[in-house]
Amino acid sequence: MHGSFTYLLRRGWAELRNEVFVLPSRTLVLLWVLALLALPLVYGDPYVLRILTMTCIFAIFAASWDLLAGYTGQVNFGHALFFGAGAYASALLSLKLGLSPWLTIWAGAAVALVFGFVVGYLCLRLRGSYLSLATLAFPLIALGLLFAFPDFSGGELGISGLRRLALTPTGNYYLAALSMLAIVFALWALADSKFGIVLHAIRDDEVAARASGINTLRYKLIVFAIAGAAAGFSGALFAHYLRVAGPSTLEVALSFQVVIWGIFGGLATIYGPVAAVFILYPLTEWLGSFRTFGELRLLIFALIVLVVLLFMPRGLTPWVRDKIEMQCPRCKQRNAFWNKVCRLCGAGLESQVSRAQRLVGHQ
Amino acid sequence: MLQDILVTGLVNGGVYALLAIGFSLIFGVARIVNIAHTAFYMLAAYCFYALLVKGGLGFLLSALISVTAVTLLSVVCYRLVIEPVREHEAAVLIATIALALVFQELMLFSFGGHYLGIPSTLEGGVRFLGVSIPYQRLLILVVAAAMLILVWFVLYRTRLGLAIRATANDLEVANLMGMNVNRVAMLSVALSVVLAAVAGVVVAPVFVVDPFMWLAPLVTMLAIVVLGGLGSLKGSLIGALIIGYVEAITVFAVPAGAYLKGAVALLIMVIVLLARPEGLFGVAFEEER
């Protein structure tokens, strides 16, 4: 018993040293996860926990958009539809039928999954800008219907008086943080798998992908459904955390917000949009807490986005990643910036290799 | 009621046409989805308000100054913000969203969030087919028609228009033929913002002016442009009239129509797209591979 425990410990340490600490980006992710989990134990201020809970919820939302827009190239301008569908569905079920919130968040995700399927089906023949502008319409159609039937939807005020999932701020925080970690890592694993490679292919050249025997329609439908379900889950969490599902969950502003997060962080990375939410959302909240220039927070937010874009047009995380890591010219594996030779194949890095050779890809 | 629908649809359609044709022009020439397009319309309305009500200048002078100032501002924004990131499509997209937010917040900060009213340029009205049409709405119609004719003239009867159409058709070949495509893109941005600014100035006395007035026409404009076919000016004009009339019919003939008018207009767009994915007059251009 004792022997197997030390074996596991040593095995785990070896994995950490060989797989995580060799790359600065992986070390950063590990530190971020540990910090997220340890924060309430060290610093339990309810205001900070509240902001971070919201950050975690929006991180799920942004990551789900990236799977659809970044990987598959279906740049969805109406992602708020899934968020709102999840929020309203779980709110209606828990209030009208009295179901437990632990059940209704799954129901919200399921309803959003169906919405994702329907939107995906309607948009199968659209591409590029047509798809973006057409998808912008769906949450607004839903919003118009909600306002036209206020008895059912609560109109402007939305559906309020929901129960929270957990009673303490720490409980709610852990709930949001753990679901965020689970969903984001699941999305990342999915995007990093064979499935994700197919998505890259569909984005880069759909005709060629179809010619290679990929059923692109089926893949697009599946991605719409998955992204919808994840966004719906975050919407349901949001509704139960704020205890209200209102029309703000369907507004254009939220759809645009997720586009900004996604592109600011870096498309087709999953971790990029999550990082963008973790930087931008607390930043705007913090700016809003100042009395003198709190009104200007959206202005400052927009200016920061503009200025950062001028320097990092591909987004924040690809820029940072290029600074701290480089690609081995021979085997295409990533190496920390301090390595002189590739950690896997021993080829010389940067200093010995000319730019021309790097472009060719091998010596 | 029928006459109301006819007149309102025509007036709204004219305003939408001004916005949609400008947006289509930028998209056609520079492939920019300019979310900030209606923000310039909002800026022009505010500028007109400031000069007319606060500054006490005449109608014509304020209108001229606002259109010129907003157009110059758009060119500056294009050079400073859009051009450096032109080759990154995603970056251009959120740069225009961020620009629109900047303008909205600046106006919110300097004028406050409340509705501002502007006195009518022309008082009184005329009776036509049993409907009384205020002169102000008639003015919108006349200005819209004049601007559309002006745009037609610029595009089809001048060398600049030839360059714009050539660039929209094939950017690389136009470049090889010796056109300065960057300058053409800049000039078409200016031309399209002139249209948006004129629209902002003429509707300011009819609608209320507030910092969020760019969102509703933005969505309608995008629906029109997609409905008519991206980059097609004829499509934008016809789409604008269709959506203008659909909205008017919904408002006058359907209960709770005021809430539903946006939804119905967008539904029409979705239905058209399902039948014809490239819009009514869009060309199904080959993917650039």
Image (tube, rainbow, N blue to C red):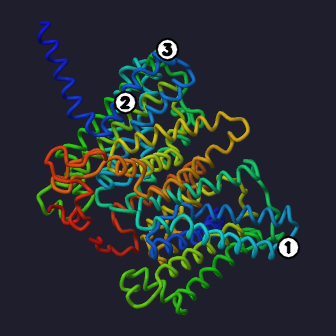
Amino acid carrying mark 3 in the image: Thr
Secondary structure under badge 2?
helix
Query: How packed is label 3: few (under 14 Cα within 10 Å), some, or many (20 or more)?
Result: few
B225 and B164: which is toward the camera: B164
Q: Residue at x 83, y 70 (%)?
A: B124
Amino acid carrying mark 2 in the image: Leu
Q: Name the residue under label 3.
A: A168
Mark 1 vs mark 2: in front: 2
A171 and A290: which is toward the camera: A290
Chain of the residue where label 3 is placed in the rendered structure: A
Q: Mark 2 points at which residue?
A: A31
Residue A69 pos. (x, y %): 35, 51
Mark 3 vs mark 2: in front: 2
Q: In this view, does B65 lie to the left or right of A244?
A: right
A8 and A76: which is toward the camera: A8
Q: Name the residue under label 1.
A: B58
Chain of the residue where label 2 is placed in the rendered structure: A
Is the residue B178 above or below the residue A275 in the image?
A: below
Amino acid carrying mark 1 in the image: Gly
